[in-house]
Amino acid sequence: MYAEVENVEALSPDLVRVVLAGGTLDQFEASDATDAYINARFLPVDSPVSVPFEPADLDGLPAEQRPRARRYTIRSWNPETRRLAIDFVVHGDTGYAGSWAKRARPGDRLQFEGPGGSYRPSADADWHLLVGDESAFGAIGASLESLAPGSRAEVLALTERPGQEIAFPSAADVNVQWLYREGAEQPENVLVESVANTPFPDGRFDVFVHGEAGEVRAIRRHLMDDRGIEPVATSISAYWRRHQSDDDWRKVKRQFMSV
Ligand SMILES: Cc1cc2nc3c(=O)[nH]c(=O)nc-3n(C[C@H](O)[C@H](O)[C@H](O)COP(=O)(O)OP(=O)(O)OC[C@H]3O[C@@H](n4cnc5c(N)ncnc54)[C@H](O)[C@@H]3O)c2cc1C
């Protein structure tokens, strides 16, 4: 399916909210998951193909002109207006998806499949632990928005520097710890060290940790090995890998995350 960019809003210097509408969105079927994602196809700038395209349109195209598959979380879906919002990290001019979002203008088209997704804050949990960098803010935001009044969440959110915080509206009792790479001796350790220094409230909880692969793996090890926790439910996975394109990262992801 495909949709058109209706609106682009800079949430921070590194994060852009793209609202999609029209196209074939009238056929979109939402998921219950708060980490629901689409598998989008980003065309290299010099590709002769345009959206919407069929598999046959790609026949004979050289590799460098073929669309690249990238997964992006649905920050929100409005079934009445049929608008779909995605929060994209813009991380320079490398890659395809982030730079597409940086250039996106109303009328641009995006082709995608989905949604997939599996996490939703557990109704059996007394509180929820949500940890991530900017790539996970869409899922964290959607999760917090789904919580009922009286529920409780502890959030550790990593961004570049002070001033880049975003709003996480929620009816729940939410404590957000904002963390920054800038100024840290080892920016890649900021999240795991902060999780390690966070006292956990009593009661049953579930865990959602997503972001850069090395950081996510370190947090998973800490939670399992050092704290011996037994969460009600766990969703821990890497959304991206430093210094690797998503195409290369997917080839080694299973092995990397298994150790
Ligand atoms: C299920 C799922 C949901 C996701 N949801 C979101 C989402 O809602 N928003 C979002 O922004 N991302 C999300 N991601 C991550 C996103 O798919 C990857 O970041 C992807 O690699 C971006 O593709 P690209 O073409 O821009 O860069 P690539 O071509 O994959 O990579 C080019 C370079 O950019 C670097 N890079 C990639 N991502 C980042 C980043 N976030 N910060 C800094 N450098 C980076 C790479 O290490 C590489 O060096 C999600 C991933 C998964 C698996």
Image: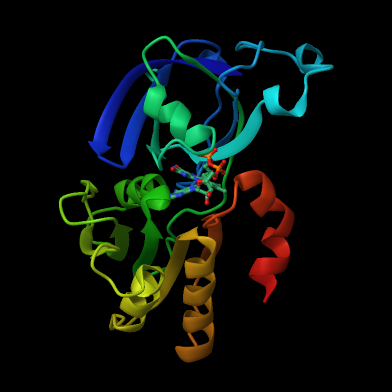
Q: Residue furthest left?
A: 163
The extreme right residue here reads: 60
Identify the image quadrant of the N terminus: top right
Name the residue: 56% across, 17% down. Answer: 2
Closer to the camera in the image, 173 or 87: 87
Q: Residue at x 81, y 13 (%)?
A: 56
> From where the camera sits, is residue 138 visible?
yes
Residue 129, placed above or below residue 36 = below
Q: Is residue 154 above or below residue 14?
A: below
Left or right: 156 in relation to 224: left
Residue beneath the point at 30% across and 63% down? 181
On-image quarter of the C terminus: bottom right
Q: Residue at x 31, y 23 (%)?
A: 8
Total marks in image: 0
Q: Nearer the viewer, residue 187 or 117?
A: 187
Left or right: residue 58 compared with residue 138: right
